[in-house]
Amino acid sequence: MLHWKKYRPIDWALVAIAVFMPFLPLVDHNGGHINVLVNAGIYMMLAIGLNIVVGFAGLLDLGYAAFFAIGSYTYAMVASPQFGLHFSFWPMVLISAFVAAIFGVILGAPTLRLRGDYLAIVTLGFGEIVPQTFLNLAKYTGGPNGISAIDQPKLFGYHFGLNPLPYYYLVLVLIAFSLIVANNLRTSRLGRAWMAIREDEIAAAHMGINTTTAKLAAFSLGASFSGLSGVVNASLLTLVSPDQFKFNVSITVLSMLVLGGMGSLPGVVVGSALLSILNFFILPQASNLAATVGLHIDFTSYRFMLYGIILVAVMLFKPEGLWGSEQRRAELKESDITKAENAEYEEMPRETV
Amino acid sequence: MATLLELRQIDAFYGRIQALHGISLRVDKGEVVALIGSNGAGKTTTLRVISGLLRPAHGQVIYEGQDITRLSPDLIVGRRLIQSPEGRRIFARMTVLENLQLGAYTRTSLTEVAESLEEVFTLFPRLKERINQKGGTLSGGEQQMLAIGRALMSKPELLLLDEPSLGLSPLLVQTIFSIIRDINKRGVTILLIEQNARQALQIAHRGYVLETGNITMQDTAANLLASEEVRAAYLGGSVKAS
């Protein structure tokens, strides 16, 4: 629960940036910048979804890109010349989210008894199987070429086209919606069940929490957000192909959570924004800059090395993430708790009985 | 008195190792029943079978006249058969209040939950003082109070307590046991698992002795306390002393 007095200046800065975002295109007319922000927004939605699975429920999922692929392909198959279908964009946003949620249950069910490392390995497998399946079902998915000429959204007769600006506003609205939904989930009864499971699954079962249902709900609700971003992704690029959903997407999204702070919604926003800025803006700019002084270094190819350095630095200096939740901070300071536990037992006054 | 819980011929295994051999026991409404035995006798296993965490190979668990052997743990909790788990298992990184609220997870009426919270604070004023403190920073005794308080938040009909005296100073053990007696007087039936046999039998109405997965004795608590075999094996006194 947030209290007014707890807000720090940096919290207000974050709020100010969020309020300013809708007005940014009035100041910055550079379409390239807007395009970068749209891509960053798609990743932010993915991070909000993965945070439900990993941050709230504590289920380490290394194959989240699979759901992003399912969301993207769902829209691509019904809104392109592939089958000659041209479903409207808007209902498909919800339908794709729903389809991704169903696959969340299907892929989540076999992993229910697994924990930690084992869960991570199985989800990693799913993350590989899904793009491979799309690659090999060439009859339906276009195989390695994917599906192209995907329809772009229309709103009241206005055609989105290739201009990134309408996508920018669409993504802003979807992020706001996702954050509200995720925050409501966090404080709901289900959210409390997730946190209890993350803390101690056996104790959670003793509280009367159905751990099976709660974990499946985390997988499917988490996946549904990637359905949203998948639809936006497919219509923005007008092309989907299996190589867009490789392992590095899952790892990038997970790195965003680790950087910002797992389980913390402001952390997810900050972490995904920072990593996207690095990814889509700083690295390409740095390469351009190097080229102007005659150095031909492609900094973007050092992306994962930089992620690695950043993550190691975060783990060393701020292990709960840049904007970690208080809970997470406590989890990482386990040793203090154990110390207190071993402290001498206090005597209790008898009259309390 | 009406029978609340009955175990009939329970066989339970961990893999291929048989932990319980045809256990039968009964808890009547309003009773405190103690299940005593040494390490590895199968006390915790018995509780795991009752609360649905371990499926027995044979036998039945009958609660309020219904077979609950195959029900999942959450449904059993829904029937107000609550276990305060072995080793307390409080949520160390959540506050006292959040722990207690999770205890009331299965309940829907907010006013009733508030009433239970008041009741828990009456039994354990110390918890009220520490309401916003993280569970993990409480002392061992306070953690045990929190574990029992959390179990009470679900308004149990039958409360299963697993080693409530574990790791507590002798004075705190006294306190915890008199609170358990208090809880029983408020109408909660209790099945108590203890290694501290003397304390357990002093507050219990009846008791069972468990040895390597078999029930070897059953009697009223007073008779068990007086029994020479029990004294020799569990009460630490010499057989002759009286």
Image: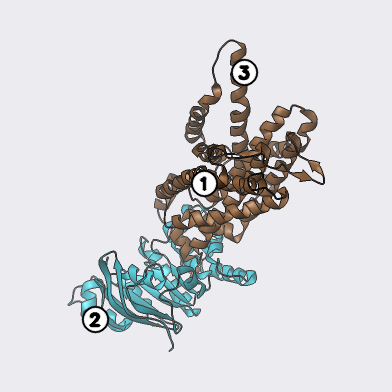
Chain colours: A brown, B cyan
Q: Which mark is residue A137?
A: 1
Chain letter belonging to callout 3:
A
Q: Residue at image x 65%, y 37%? A: A237
Q: Is residue A320 left or right of residue A42?
A: left
Q: Earlier in the sequence, mark 3 or mark 1?
A: 1
User: Which amino acid, mark 2?
Assistant: Ser
Splitting the image into 4 quarters, where does residue B2 fall?
bottom left
In this figure, which residue is indicated by the disc labeled 2? Answer: B227
Amino acid at circle 3: Asn
Residue A105 visible? The answer is yes
* B6 up-or-down from A77: above or below: below
Image height of A344 relative to A329, above or below: below
Residue that carries the numbered disc 3 in the rendered image: A288
The quarter holding residue B40 reads: bottom left
Residue B128 image position (x, y, % from top left): 56, 62
Point 50% across, 75% down: residue: B79
Question: Counting other residues with Cα less than 10 Å from the Cα at mark 3, is it few (<14), some (14-19), or many (20 or more)?
Answer: some
Q: Nearer the viewer, residue B180 or B48?
A: B48
